[in-house]
């Protein structure tokens, strides 16, 4: 009875329970269901042998009239990202318990639907299943933001939705084209696609269609205009999921598909990588001048994702390995930073970074946890951020020294804006707001402790994860060299 | 054949019951008649088939379409009761007309002789002209009826002209006896004109001008009939003409069809963007959907007709929910402006959820039938080497996503002090079935596709 389909169905079925139950129970059901999914997942992968390509395959006939199947399964990169999903969503659900009265049971139901869709997305084993989950992940998140968040949220989420749907329909066009080029009787699993080579012109078209979709979803530099509005208007607990996991969907997709168009990638990467690196510096410089916490985090996310994309596009195995690791690490850290923002904003009722100045004196525990998370975001050694960034920069330097040098600016710049954020919000003159000295609640403490343990342990013992991500990105190369 | 006879008899008795003021009986009796007729159709009861003398023939596709129409009618008929509640006396008349129109549609989809096609079209159209004006105390309803009548009569005349030319150029009215195939200019003209006449009935660009005005004025439930059942009938007729007369259709027709599909999608989308009335919005959106369906006609054969029929099923399921939801909103708020749907989630969460599922399906998001339908059509078009058409259709689908989700955006709010209102449990039940079918067909398309094949 160990199958990935059941892993997807557990949150789906419990979401129905959460929808119909009362406000009080819905939260407990949601946390319970996500933790059950986490344990089920751990049991599922406990027998995983990295030498085998996939585990727990489930494949069903899906679309009649074609050979397209519904295919989910776990391979190395699925495992890393599914684990991230199953860690961040329970944390965000626990975080909602602080102000539980604001959330109705529909919030928890929709969150479980998101969890289900994300697990499906990360375990999808063929392009059409991938597309299916890519698009439906949007729906529950759209409704959550529509109902919970700031005053301007409707406009923000509508823009986000239309942008992303535009991208995903372009992607659908690319996939239909790819399917057409393969011929009617091909089964389109990743493992089958490894053996297939398209001609250069086809590769260009497929690459253009998919890259636009992923660039919008991540977002990357020229397509980021929806990001700041959404990040500053959505509810912070929802943002933990959006910034932590949803923003990784685009780069994950790029990593998944990069073997489909290797030649196009080779031709275009000298133009696209500088664009990504420009986005890295641009995002960091704007983040430096922000006074709104959520906007600062939005631009910091833009900057980090630019580097991850550049690493994937460089087509170097070390860089890609680092990018997969960094997706996990940044997902955790971004979620944690939005959690910090939530903790601070609940105490000050303002989104300004100056509003909580002097908090370290009243609440040293928050300051300490926050400091560790900031260090991980900067990428200091012994935290998870360091390992990923080191591998990415190392790999990119092998391709072109300038990529490494300019990309390396991210460490300096992120140190500047994150430490500025930390200093302004934690130290300085106390404003004298009584609510600031409110001690950490139990659920907040749990979230902090779990995040800090994960961040440090990943930084100190990264070997398992590095090996797993190396295996994930080298599958394709192994197949090609055996041919 | 028997099913048509049963429907005619039931419709006549319904009219009679209306005269006798037995209004409580009318809808249950009509439903019973529909179910009985459906039963005869499904079980291939062969009674009186020899009477048709080759004028009509129930093949597998026309049988499938007829079954879909009758099932849709079973979902529509209970909503006629709402009209009754408002103190209107016409329930007997409108039910009778509705059942007569079903007879016409079954004739339209299973004709072999062009005269039967014309008869079917006329039976449907006349019933629909009257239904459009059913709310006779409202000026807009009268206006809609008159407009629909004038434009529809024009369309029927064009169709008849085409049929006459068809007879002149081939020497027969019967598609089965079509032996004298030539591509004389007269026969090419007849094909073009018959196609235009049918395009009138489905409101494809450039024959769409009547649709928004008529949709807006007609009582909303009858608009639902116009947008679903009548369109299925006209597409069925188009299918029969294209497949049976396949040797007769000149190849430039398919270029024309692609052009009409593109024009419908483009113009419908652009016009829908600026609408403030929900019914007009759905009128333009139905033009877009018709354009999408017509893409499937470019290389239609009996083997891949199931893709078009699947689209029709998905479209019918979603459209019915949309129009019925608008009916309830209109009842409550007195207007069908988009602003009437604001805060719907706080006032009536049930209606908001089913309405948004229907809109999502019309937009074509995965896991709903609308996505699968679009995927089938586009995949087929791609294999037919029309990649350009696929790309344009996808870009235009984004535009349609904009106005569907603008509506959803308005509905979902967390207003605390909203006035709650409810709809009857029977209607809720029907809504739930329609929505569950939308999702079930979208998640596991094999459920219905195996039957359609």
Image (spheres, coloured by chain):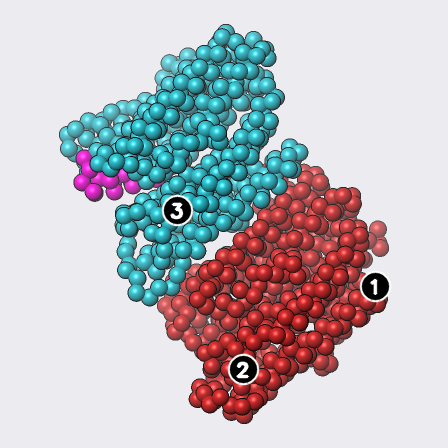
Q: Which chain is cyan?
A: B
Kindly state the secondary structure of the residue where label 2 is placed. Answer: loop
Pointer 1 residue: A399
Residue B367 drawn at (x, y percent): 51, 50
Residue A368 drawn at (x, y percent): 60, 87
Q: Which residues are magenta?
A: B75-89
Magenta portion: prevailing SS class: helix
Relative to residue B35, is residue B439 depicted above or below? Answer: below
Answer left or right for B431 relative to A316.
left
- Whether residue A63 is visible here, answered yes or no, is no
Q: Residues within 10 Å of mark 2 (few under 14, many from 20)?
A: many
Instruction: Measure the alpha-carbon separation of dots 1 and 2.
Output: 42 Å
Say which residue appears at 70% left-offset and 69% top-offset: A281
Residue A208 drawn at (x, y percent): 69, 49
Chain letter of disc 1?
Answer: A
Pointer 3 residue: B276
Q: Nearer the viewer, mark 1 or mark 3?
A: 3
Say which residue appears at 69% left-offset and 64% top-offset: A279
Chain letter of disc 2?
Answer: A
Q: Residue B169 or B266: which is nearer the viewer?
A: B266
Q: Which mark is residue A354?
A: 2
Name the image quarter holding residue A427.
bottom right
Marks 1 and 2 in Cβ contact (< 8 Å): no
Instruction: Measure the alpha-carbon separation of dots 3 and 2.
Output: 44 Å
């Amino acid at each position: 009875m160990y199958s990935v389909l059941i892993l997807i169905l557990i949150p789906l079925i419990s979401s129905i329970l959460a929808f119909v139950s009362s406000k009080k129970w819905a939260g407990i059901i949601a946390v319970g269901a996500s933790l059950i999914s986490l344990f089920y997942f751990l049991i599922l992968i406990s027998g995983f042998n990295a030498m085998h390509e996939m585990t727990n395959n489930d494949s069903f006939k899906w679309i009649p009239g074609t050979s397209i199947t519904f295919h989910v399964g776990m391979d190395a990169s699925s495992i890393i990202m599914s684990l991230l999903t199953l860690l961040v969503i329970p944390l965000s659900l626990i975080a909602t318990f602080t102000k539980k009265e604001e959330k109705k049971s529909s919030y928890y139901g929709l969150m479980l639907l998101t969890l289900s869709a994300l697990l499906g997305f990360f375990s999808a084993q063929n392009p059409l299943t991938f597309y299916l989950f890519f698009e439906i992940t949007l729906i529950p998140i759209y409704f959550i933001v529509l109902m919970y968040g700031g005053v301007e949220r409707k406009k923000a989420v509508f823009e986000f939705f239309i942008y992303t749907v535009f991208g995903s329909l372009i992607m659908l066009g690319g996939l239909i084209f790819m399917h057409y080029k393969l011929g009617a009787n091909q089964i389109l699993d990743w493992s089958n696609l490894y053996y297939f080579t398209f001609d250069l012109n086809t590769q260009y078209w497929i690459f253009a269609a998919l890259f636009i979709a992923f660039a919008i979803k991540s977002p990357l530099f020229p397509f980021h205009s929806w990001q700041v509005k959404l990040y500053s208007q959505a509810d912070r607990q929802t943002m933990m999921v959006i910034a932590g996991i949803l923003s990784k969907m685009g780069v994950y997709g790029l990593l998944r598909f990069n073997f489909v168009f290797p030649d196009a990638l080779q031709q275009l990467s000298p133009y696209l990588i500088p664009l990504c690196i420009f986005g890295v510096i641009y995002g960091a410089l704007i983040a430096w001048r922000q006074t709104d916490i959520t906007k600062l985090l939005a631009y910091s996310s833009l900057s980090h994702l630019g580097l991850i994309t550049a690493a994937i596009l460089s087509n170097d195995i070390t860089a890609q390995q680092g990018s997969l690791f960094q997706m996990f690490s940044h997902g955790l850290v971004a979620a944690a930073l939005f959690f910090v923002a939530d903790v601070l904003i609940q105490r000050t009722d303002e989104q300004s970074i100056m509003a909580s100045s002097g908090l370290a004196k009243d609440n040293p525990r928050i300051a300490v946890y926050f400091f560790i998370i900031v260090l991980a975001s900067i990428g200091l050694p012994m935290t998870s951020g360091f390992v990923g960034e080191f591998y990415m920069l190392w790999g990119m330097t092998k391709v072109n020294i300038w990529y490494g040098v300019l990309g390396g600016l991210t460490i300096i710049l992120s140190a500047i804006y994150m430490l500025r954020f930390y200093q302004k919000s934690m130290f300085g003159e106390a404003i004298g707001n009584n609510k600031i000295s409110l001690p950490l609640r139990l659920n907040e403490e749990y979230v902090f402790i779990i995040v800090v343990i994960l961040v440090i342990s990943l930084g100190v013992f990264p070997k398992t994860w590095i090996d797993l991500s190396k295996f994930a990105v080298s599958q394709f190369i192994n197949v090609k060299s055996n041919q | 054949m028997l099913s048509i006879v049963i429907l005619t008899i039931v419709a006549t008795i319904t009219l009679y019951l209306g005269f006798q003021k037995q209004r409580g009986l009318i809808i249950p009796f009509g439903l019973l008649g529909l179910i009985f007729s459906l039963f005869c159709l499904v079980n291939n009861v062969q009674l009186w088939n020899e009477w048709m003398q080759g004028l009509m023939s129930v093949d597998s596709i026309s049988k499938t379409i007829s079954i879909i129409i009758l099932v849709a009618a079973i979902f529509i008929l209970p909503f006629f009761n709402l009209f009754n509640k408002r103190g209107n006396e016409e329930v007997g008349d409108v039910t009778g007309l509705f059942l007569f129109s079903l007879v016409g549609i079954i004739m339209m989809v299973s004709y072999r002789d062009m005269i039967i096609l014309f008869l079917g079209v006329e039976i449907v159209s006349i019933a629909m002209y009257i239904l459009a004006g059913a709310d006779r105390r409202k000026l807009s309803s009268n206006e809609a009826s008159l407009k629909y009548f004038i434009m529809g009569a024009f369309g029927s005349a064009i169709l008849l002209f085409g049929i006459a030319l068809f007879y002149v150029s081939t020497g027969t009215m019967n598609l089965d006896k079509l032996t004298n195939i030539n591509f004389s200019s007269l026969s090419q003209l007849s094909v073009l004109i018959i196609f235009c006449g049918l395009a009138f009935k489905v409101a494809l660009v450039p024959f769409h001008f009547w649709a928004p005005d008529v949709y807006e004025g007609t009582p909303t439930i009858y608009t639902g009939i116009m947008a679903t059942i009548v369109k299925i009938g006209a597409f069925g007729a188009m299918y029969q003409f294209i497949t049976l007369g396949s040797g007769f259709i000149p190849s430039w027709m398919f270029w024309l069809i692609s052009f009409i599909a593109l024009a419908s999608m483009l113009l419908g989308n652009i016009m829908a963007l600026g609408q403030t009335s929900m019914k007009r919005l759905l009128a333009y959106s139905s033009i877009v959907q018709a354009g999408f369906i017509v893409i499937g006609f470019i290389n239609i054969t009996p083997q891949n007709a199931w893709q078009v029929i699947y689209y029709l099923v998905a479209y019918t399921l979603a459209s019915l929910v949309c129009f019925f939801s608008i009916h309830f909103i209109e009842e409550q708020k007195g207007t069908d402006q988009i602003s009437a749907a604001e805060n719907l989630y706080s006032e009536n969460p049930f209606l908001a959820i089913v309405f948004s599922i229907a809109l999502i399906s019309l937009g074509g998001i995965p896991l709903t039938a609308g996505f699968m339908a679009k995927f089938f059509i586009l995949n087929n078009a791609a294999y037919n080497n029309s990649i350009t058409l696929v790309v344009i259709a996808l870009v235009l689908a984004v535009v349609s996503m904009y106005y569907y989700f603008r509506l959803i955006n308005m509905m979902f709010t967390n207003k605390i002090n909203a006035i709650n209102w409810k709809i009857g449990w029977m209607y809720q039940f029907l809504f739930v079935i329609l929505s569950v079918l939308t999702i079930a067909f979208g998640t596991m398309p094999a459920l219905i596709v195996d039957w359609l094949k």
